[in-house]
Amino acid sequence: MSLDTIVQGILLGGLYTLFAAGLSLVFGIMRLVNLAHGDLIVLAAYLVLTLVGMLGLNPFLAALIAAPLMFALGWGLQRLVLNRVLGPDILPPLLVTFGLSIVVQNGLLMGFTADSQRISAGALETASIDLGPVTLGIMPLLTFASAIAVILVLNWIFYRTALGRAFRATSDDPVTASLMGIRPKAIFAQATGLALVIVTIAALYLGMRANFDPTIGPARLIYAFEAVIIGGLGSLWGTLAGGIIIGVAQTLGAAVNPEWQILAGHVAFLAVLLVRPRGLFPRAYD
Amino acid sequence: MRPTVTTRTRASGIAAVVAVLLIAAGLALPAVADRGLIKDLFFILTMLTLAQYWNLLAGYGGLVSVGQQAFVGLGAYGLFGAAITWGMDPVLALPLGGILALIVAVPTAFFAFRLAGAYFAIGTWVVAEVVRLSVAQWKAVGGGTGTSLPREVQTDMTGSALIEALFDVRSAAAQDILAYWLALALAVMTIGGIYLLLRSKSGLALAAVRDNAEAARAVGVNAKRMKWLVFLAAAFGTGLTGALIYLQKGRISPDAAFSVTDWTAYVIFIVVIGGIGTIEGPILGILVFFVLQTLFADYGSTYLLALGLIGIFVMLFAPRGLWGAISDRTGVQFFPIRRRLTLPAKPPGT
Amino acid sequence: MTLLQTRGLTARYGDFQALFGVGITLEVGECVAIIGANGAGKTTLMRSISGVLANSPDQVVFDGQPIGALPADQVMARGIAMVPEGRRLFPSLTVEENLLIGAHGRKVAGPWTLEAIYGLFPILKERRRNPGTALSGGQQQMVAIGRALMSNPRVILRDELSLGLAPVVIRDIYAALPRIRDGGGSVIIVEQDIGQALKVADRVYCMMEGRVTLSGRPADLSRDAIHDAYFGALA
């Protein structure tokens, strides 16, 4: 149980926060949980991979190009499919996004085969800083910094812009929001688009960090979901806390026995759920 | 004369007769059917049973679980565990599979009911993952790679010798017939049990809780108890079915027994296509699914992709599924649950 | 020209019909009051005009244009703002943000700016950073009115203003009404308090069970006529 293990866990938490931030955003605004969220992260990873291969770009630039494409995908998905199933009944959005998960996974399998892929990041992959008791990999550090940046930007959007006001108002009361000239369906589409931009950032770091294949989506969804629940619905900084907790639990578990890494994360989640069903920093009203 | 409540319709009367005939035919089938057909029917009956339980949970109980594969796997591993560790006859060990699933269902419900809606769904998925990862550590049943049913235990199953003599077949074929009969019995008991539950007062309470939990509580329905009841019943039934499925397969591994695709995705597809919230729906759904599976399963990912798309389209444009569409047009119900109040005729002169 | 009118307005909630051919008019600069008991259809009328409920296009005409079928955001953009029943402030927004969002769909130059609203209701300036719902009922009503004014609307619909408010508070809010009219707004108010309505309105409509049962200038309406129209004369 060394300091190094904990620090690695915290940095891993950055990646999980990136997985979770988009999920948290969409649920906060429209009470929708997209069961295909993890698969969309994998889709974005393949998109970045393709752009790197096709255009010979550095992965960060490829992600920059992929981001607006993913925004458009999210926007279109919400407009054409998800807006139709939003409503008091929870079953349709659940089943539609579950079906979407199957479609994305198998589409990727058909397009790219089940082979493991990796986005090569050159020297960055192994670069590190030696800080005495701990050695910090540059990649995990970048990932964590990006997670913080994403949360800061999202908070800025939510609390300092007109769009953010519209997000919050629509989340509170879509009917009265429409009386203010807001079109809830358009807001939802923008929110999903924004969520998929965050998904692209998450995919970039996922793809550079480890091998990926079309079937790893659901596990990412589960980590994202656990981070959101631990943090508390409606709190973006809470999602960061949740991601860090999962990350640290996993690295601690792995240090004891590598086979226990994932299980340790789940156990930590269940433990928090046991004592704090609403999460650590839940919104006051829901 | 007091007012009476009836649910029977003409269509249901006919359906009841047809059902009895079908069951009788099903029992006699092994005398004439070849082994391939028996195996296909086994698949249909077990998937139908799983679908009925998922439908009970989600369609009637309003509890959408994407973690039922946990109970399929637990039932199967309960059976294999008993057979391997205690040399138990698999047929006698079937209920143990159900019981193991039931035992794990208790803490599962405890955690999962702390969440609502879509988060409940993912919560059940997390539990399924925890169970899968934990079972993969169980060395006695093969750990991560899995194991087979011991030969001695397999050939000597209760009823196996009787069937061999009755139909003049070898041991392996007899086991298939035995499994088929058990599946038929399980399917009939499940559908019958669910139908009786829905016609009972508990069933009415269940519908009330699904529609509006607050209002249901206001009239004295114990919503929490109903949810627990339904969840545990579905877990037990799913575990029992899982045990039977793997009894027939003879070989188990964590990835197979806890597969989300086989035990949740396909099951959800069957229920959604057929018609969620009806007993007839999954029956129609499994028939459609079986045809699709037989014709197209070889196409692998393309097939699964198509299934996913079909599921999405059905939820968008025909959320009540095939049976819902038929029932809406014709008003037919083979398993009628809607209660009609018949008032006594007024004597003339009042 | 008549600024706003409804013609044979019908509305239903599922199988239940709430409005049976309601016709009202609003001239530029007027203040019209709709009175009636609970369930008379007053709020349904407001929701129809504001676009929350969809009707046939010609059933609501604004500035000569049929708007009956338009959704709420488009109606608002044309200059009809609503102060909804129950205030319905956004709990996730501060007082100031609640005001600002009032202009989200319509940015038109006019007398009503943030500062002007603070001038109308000075207490709000003190509380500008509080969450919208952490205020007293009367103050919330002020925010709701200010929110509607921020879009410099040509018509303001005010639904059930006096519900649950102390008489002193109601008086303060109604005192602001002349300034609103001076700013160029024409107003339709829905009121359960008949006395208050008769005091401020140029014309009054009385509704019962989805129909207009009486209309006219307050001076021309007798107490008995209003009573009958409000409660329904016994057959």
Image (cartoon, coloured by chain):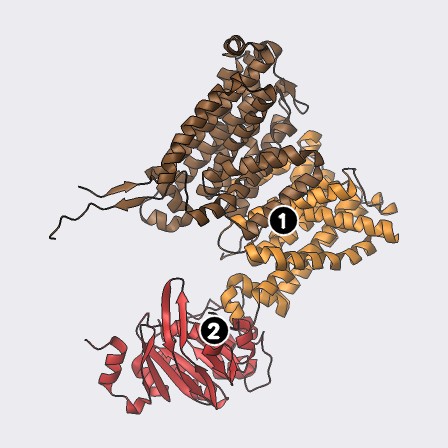
Chain colours: A orange, B brown, C red
- Which residue appears farthest toward the left when viewing the image? B349
Question: Residue at left 43%, top 36%?
Answer: B230
| B171 vs A199: above or below | above
Q: Residues within 10 Å of mark 2 (few under 14, many from 20)?
A: some
The residue that disc 2 covers is C56
Q: Secondary structure at mark 1?
A: helix
Question: Residue at left 53%, top 76%?
Answer: C76
Mark 1 vs mark 2: tell me if same chain.
Answer: no
In this orientation, does residue A245 appear? no
The percent position of residue B108, horizontal first and vertical second, equals 51, 35
| B241 vs C45: above or below | above
Q: Report which quarter residue B153 is drawn in.
A: top right
Front residue of C224/C163: it is C224
What amino acid is at disc 1? Ala
* Badge 2: chain ID: C
What amino acid is at disc 2? Ser
| In this picture, residue B155 sits left or right of residue C12 | right
Front residue of A244/B346: it is B346
The percent position of residue B218, horizontal first and vertical second, equals 33, 49
The percent position of residue A31, horizontal first and vertical second, equals 55, 54
* Badge 1: chain ID: A
Q: Secondary structure at mark 2?
A: loop
| In this picture, residue A30 sits left or right of residue B194 | right
Question: Residue at left 57%, top 28%?
Answer: B43
The percent position of residue A37, horizontal first and vertical second, equals 65, 48
Q: Which mark is residue B137?
A: none
Q: Residues within 10 Å of mark 1 (few under 14, many from 20)?
A: many
In this orientation, does residue B255 appear? yes
Question: Residue at left 56%, top 20%?
Answer: B33
| In this picture, residue B287 sits left or right of residue C53 | right
Front residue of A231/A224: it is A224
The residue that disc 1 covers is A241
